Amino acid sequence: MVKIGILGVGTVGASVARILQENADIIEARAGKKIVVKSGVVKDLSKDRGVSIKLSDDPNDVIDDPEIDIVIELMGGVDEAYTLVKKALEQKKAVVTANKALLAYHRYELQELAGDIPFMYEASTAGGIPIIGALRSGLSANHINAIQGIMNGTCNYMLTKMIHEGADYQEILKEAQDLGYAEADPTFDVGGFDASHKLLILASIAYGLDAKPEDILIEGIENITPTDVAFAKDFEYAIKLLGIAKKVGNKVELRVHPTMIPQESMLAKVDGVMNAVMVNGDCVGETMYYGPGAGGNATASAVIADIVDIVRGNSGPMLGYKKPLESGLTLLPKEEIRSHYYLRMSVDDKKGVLAEVTRLFSELDISIEAMMQKPDIDKDACVELLFVIHECEEKTIQQAIVELEKLDVIHGKVGMIRIEQ
Ligand code: NAP
Ligand code: HSE
């Protein structure tokens, strides 16, 4: 029998405990041993968790228990989780975590600390989809050319409802929280940070790249307007929060942002809480992994898969390699990322304004691919100018936005969404 302790019996932790009981037969058949939850840890002992396991409010009751073989960290957060996981590894206990924030900051130290002790984290990225296993093992013959995907269930759920049903941003965020999809602080979801944590984990496995969230381009879904949604529909685009990792020569670009993608593309059809990750490898070509990206049961499914692998002795090196991967790969500075862009600006409805805007584009060597004018329903005597810009560097478009916002004829902020063809 293998005994486990769960740090954090919340949405995911309670599902793990329940599924281990309800599906005990099949799990034991696959693992070869009975897996039992010995105890769990919560902050508030008075709350009903709907599971019959012994609970404590002191994480050390799990970490220091000599009978516990595997510690499951499902508390969230970075610093306290790191301290506890480190302590568990020092006591030679195997660790399973779903905590992408922890891994975004400490994955390389944890790999070092873990050494040969199993450390698994399938649930940290794209919920129930076995994308970590696919990258660590299934695609191990490949140099990875690119990874592109929808990696946050909350944002995809919100965007789907906002675009297809016209749902209100705050109401739909509340719904995602009630469904157990969102992080304890949902700004991690809507701000793109949670997806960036996942992208960094995937980039470590694919490229051995050591970067922190602060190093990469991250934008969230907070500034998408109904005008953007209408424009996307008119031009047959879907808007998705994408995480993108792409090898460009001996550099890797990493970015998370709302993206207009053609409606006929496969990622455009991934709706609701579903996630999908496309991985392009030099031998296999394009592959795609699809499934629920958040929620208690889907995430618990991935956590338990890790537990079963550990019990079977199938864990392997934490990041999937025993020696350094491709040498010389470094992060492409975010200013050098190239993309197509959509720009939105509210301008005075008078002659000469369009000429002023296009002159500025011309001075910055920015080329316009398409242009549209719509009435600005929020401002009298104003219209909204919408542009699609041919591919250019990020620093050029950022400079254009700064210069545009200085013009007297432009009101408020200039909106921008990147376009992937
Ligand atoms: P949650 O519902 O907020 O659960 C967190 C649990 O940890 C709660 O039971 C909380 O206790 C406990 N906890 C937090 N700090 C503690 C402390 N200092 N001492 C003792 N107990 C503590 O969160 P969740 O949604 O289950 O997520 C857990 C982890 O999984 C996070 O890292 C999250 O990013 C990750 N994850 C979540 C999902 C998802 O769909 N929800 C998917 C993939 C990964 P109280 O309940 O008493 O506050
Ligand atoms: N808050 C995360 C999401 C949970 O919505 O995708 C799954 O990692």
Image (cartoon, helix red, strand yellow):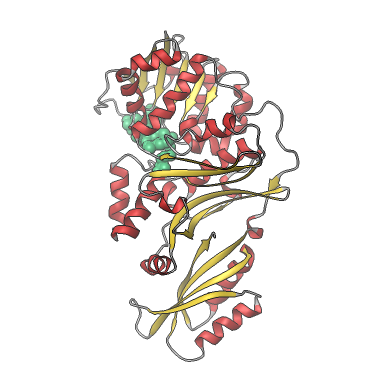
Residue 408 visible: yes
Residue 76 visible: no
**Taking 352 as reference, is 181 left or right?**
left
Q: Nearer the viewer, residue 62 or 160?
A: 160
> Is residue 152 positioned above or below 163 on the image?
above
Residue at the spot x=62%, y=49% of the render? 246
Q: Nearer the viewer, residue 69 or 355?
A: 355
Q: Quadrant of residue 393?
A: bottom right
> Is residue 257 positioned above or below 97 on the image?
below
Residue at the spot x=44%, y=9% of the render? 67
Q: Residue furthest bottom?
A: 351
> Is residue 393 positioned above or below 114 on the image?
below
Residue 370 % position (x, y): 52, 75
Q: Quadrant of residue 225?
A: bottom left
Residue 206 % position (x, y): 62, 38
Q: Quadrant of residue 13?
A: top left
Residue 277 % position (x, y): 50, 43
Residue at the spot x=32%, y=46% of the render? 176
**Taking 7 as reference, is 149 left or right?**
right
Quarter of the figure with the C terminus: bottom right
Residue 242 % position (x, y): 49, 51
**Taking 140 as reference, is 417 left or right?**
left
- Report the number of discs: 0
Q: Nearer the viewer, residue 190 or 421?
A: 421
